[in-house]
Image: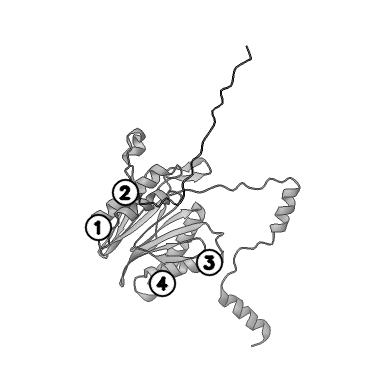
Amino acid sequence: MNHENAKTLSMSLSGAPGFDFCNTQRNMAMAKMGAKIPTLRSTGTTIVAATFKGGVVMGADSRATQGNIIADKNCMKVHKLTESLFCCGAGTAADLDQVSKMISSNLRLQELNTGKKARVITAVRMAKQHLYRYMGYIGAYLLIGGVDPTGSYLYEMSAHGVSMAKPFASEGSGSYAAISILERDFKFAQTEEDAKALVQRALHAGMHGDNASGNSLNLVTITPANTKFEGPIVPDFCVQPEKIELEYKFKPGSTQVLKQKEVKYDVIESMDISQ
């Protein structure tokens, strides 16, 4: 084998390259000339998942935003990979759709070739290898969970391809409120009903505490026996927001006070001399 053939073979084995940034300097020059550069817009969502004895419950809200604009009130963020594997996505809607479709098609081909159900770790590895190649420029933050012949699993994954197995997890702009509910109420080896109620409460907290999350929620419950999808479920406070009352029952002293500072202000009264 000559040098050129060896080089071609090594390139084909290494996989497709990542994004091409050769136009970066051109774009910077155009910006200096007055060309309008696309505005970066923040994304928002709340996705939640929790394990229970023998299965996984996953859920997400349905609001898609474009900056401060609600672009879609019925955005599906719970994606089916196989009959027993699902993923929830936070980030860029188009990236999440394409990544989930790619993983789903590859897992289906594997199942057809092997005659066996795809495993959760297989989906995780496919996703992390793809995302790591693009170093975070694909806006896909994933929760991948499901049941396979070896058990039930839940993985959390960043857009850079960093993954971690967890008993419960939350991502998105509403995850700060949602994770507080999960950390307070999660119990190992809980029942399916308790896990479903916990995920719904966490989603309610995220939807109530984050303007970019809301409208309705979708749930999927995965067990070795079957997979059940529910939604859209519209919480009561989305219909009558004035009646919402969420309690965060953290005991006083849960957060340590590191430093206190007393600030004094001088009140100055001004006289109106305009008349």
State the mark number for residue 125.
none
Decide which of 15, 183 is in the foreground and name it: 183
Q: Regarding mark 3 in the picture, which secondary structure is present there?
A: helix
x 53%, y 33%: residue? 265
Give the Cα separation between the discs numbered 2 and 1: 28 Å
List the single residue furthest toward the right: 33
Q: In which quarter of the image is residue 186?
A: bottom left
Tell me which label, 3 or 1, sits earlier in the chain.
3
Dividing the picture into quadrants, the one containing residue 19 is bottom right
Separation of residues labelled 3 and 4 (CA atoms): 22 Å
Along the polypeptide, which appears first: circle 2 or circle 3? 3
Image point (31%, 72%), residue name: 150
Disc with the residue nearer the chain's start (3 vs 4): 4
Position of residue 247 measured from the top left corner of the image (x, y, whole percent) = 31, 43
Say which element carries label 1.
helix
Tell me, for residue 132, which label it has, or none: 3
The residue to which callout 2 is attached is 251
